[in-house]
Amino acid sequence: MGVSSFSSVFHKLPRGIQLVTQLSFLRVMKNVDPECHPEVLPCGHSPLPGTASSRRDPIPGWRGLSRPDSPVTSGPSRFLGVALIRRFFRKQAALALLLAFLAAVGGYAAYAVQTGNLHVIREGLAYRSGQLDPGQLERASSRWGFRSIVNLRGGNPGERWYQDQIQTASRLGLAHFDWRMGSGDELSRERMDELVKLLQDVPKPVLIHCDGGADRSGLVSALYQFAVLQTPPDRASQALSIWFGHAPWIRPKVAAMDRSFWNYAAHHAPKESLSATSFGSD
């Protein structure tokens, strides 16, 4: 892009962006050449008396940055300035793209959790979700033909959600199993062995759920794929991912679910089938 083309593009920018850009450019050029500051002024400012810019009218929209007799726009200084401005905008664009990506991923995860976070583990065998209301549970059961529910929140007889779930399960003829665990607590291998045994024995298809469907349901889904379906551990561990709302870098305590899974996998899989992932990492 030539200087004249750059000037025409710059002239179309909002006035505020022009001002900020020229001020940033002024600070940079002062560090490069302390004598150049009379020529690099914000839009609308008058040049200092006696300078080249006071003798020639600047190109509209790019005050004094492309005059042939300007010390800023001749020789290496001009090209350095243009390069610095291009680098500035590239960095801003990269930051904007990163923020947009993180916002999109975070928004998807939040949406999934708020809408039940219902997903297939293995078609016809096992499914995972957050806490479903009676209507959601009935619709999901009608669609996938659930025969049992494993509730990872444990028995809560005094809670309305628990009473509703027990009543809905009874009305639909679903076997109901309570298994209490916390998303911030590492499970022992013995306790995970008991959980795997339960998953093997419950009537299928089974719905496995916790509150949000992200962390506890993620661990149990990973265990089911690894221990029951014989899925390689690196693939089974994908059940614990941001796509299901599992975000240990935001909520560090839930990394206990990752550690639990890799601790179990380390003691139940051939060494050559294990991922290079550090079992104790977050």
Image (tube, grey):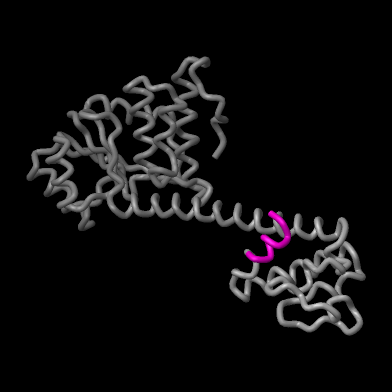
Q: Position of residue 28 (x, y in %)?
A: 81, 64
- Queried whether the magenta region covers residue 282, the answer comes back as no
Q: Nearer the viewer, residue 173 or 123?
A: 123
| Quadrant in which the C terminus appears | top right
Instruction: Judge whether 120 appears above or below 50 on screen.
Output: above
Instruction: Judge whether 12 appears above or below 248 on screen.
Output: below
Instruction: Judge whether 187 appears above or below 234 on screen.
Output: below
Q: Nearer the viewer, residue 261 or 145?
A: 145
Q: Position of residue 232 (x, y in %)?
A: 42, 22
Q: Nearer the viewer, residue 1 or 82?
A: 1
- What secondary structure is the magenta-colored segment mainly? helix
Residue 236 found in image quarter: top left
Q: Which stretch is magenta?
A: 1-8
Q: Is residue 201 left or right of residue 35?
A: left
- In the rendered image, is residue 153 in sight? no
Q: Is residue 275 left or right of residue 115?
A: right
Q: What's the residue at 45%, 39% (across, down)?
A: 257
- Queried whether the magenta region covers residue 6, the answer comes back as yes
Residue 83 found in image quarter: bottom right
Instruction: Judge whether 43 appears above or below 160 on screen.
Output: below
Q: What's the residue at 30%, 42% (across, down)?
A: 152
